[in-house]
Image (cartoon, rainbow, N blue to C red):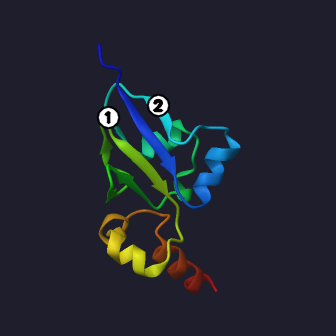
Amino acid sequence: MEKKTVEIRGFMQLREYFRRKNWPVPLILDLEEAISGYELAEKLEIPAEEVEVIFVNGFVQALDYRIQPGDRIAFLPPGCPGPYRIALGFYGKNQDNQANFLIHKKKENEQG
């Protein structure tokens, strides 16, 4: 019987998070059924506000995207430089995410 797993990585400062947890890179996690990016972050004890988008099999997705057994996942935190945000497609995938880099800037400006 084929074992159902996902392959998980953390980029930028989340890579340090993985290192502090002594997780191998990539982290292989058993996954029997579909799970959202939010649910996976919670399962790994990664605060949702520390994740702006996820890569699923090389494509940018929102955190509510359903991850399937066999997928390759990477968590990306807020703060990715500007040109990469457009080229990788963050804009269309993170509008409702509280970790959206632009939302953080807007709220800071409104409060300050």
Q: Name the residue beneath numbered marker 1.
A: 70
Residue contact at pointers 1 and 2, CB within 8 angstroms: no
Quadrant holding the C terminus: bottom right
Residue 26 place in picture, x, y as percent: 50, 41
* Residue 76 locus on image (x, y percent): 48, 59
* Marks 1 and 2, the one that precedes in the sequence: 2
The amino acid type of the residue labelled 1 equals Gly
- Left or right of 17 in this view: 93: left
In this figure, which residue is indicated by the disc labeled 2?
A: 29
For the point 32% across and 34% down, the residue is 70
- The residue sitting at 33% across, 40% down in the picture is 71
Residue 64 drawn above or below residue 89: above
Q: Residues within 10 Å of mark 1 (few under 14, many from 20)?
A: some
At label 2, the amino acid type is Leu
Quadrant assignment, res 96: bottom left
Point out residue 34 in the picture as x, y percentages from the top left corner: 31, 34
Q: Residue furthest top?
A: 1
Does residue 47 appear to the left or right of 100 in the view shown? right
Between residue 43 and residue 11, name the one nearer to us: 11
Real-space Cα separation, disc 1 to disc 2, in angstroms? 10 Å
Residue at x-position 61% and y-position 45%: 18
Tell me the element at label 2.
strand
The residue shown at (38%, 54%) is 55
| Placement of the N terminus among the 4 image quadrants | top left
Query: Residue 104: image x %, image y %?
Result: 53, 74
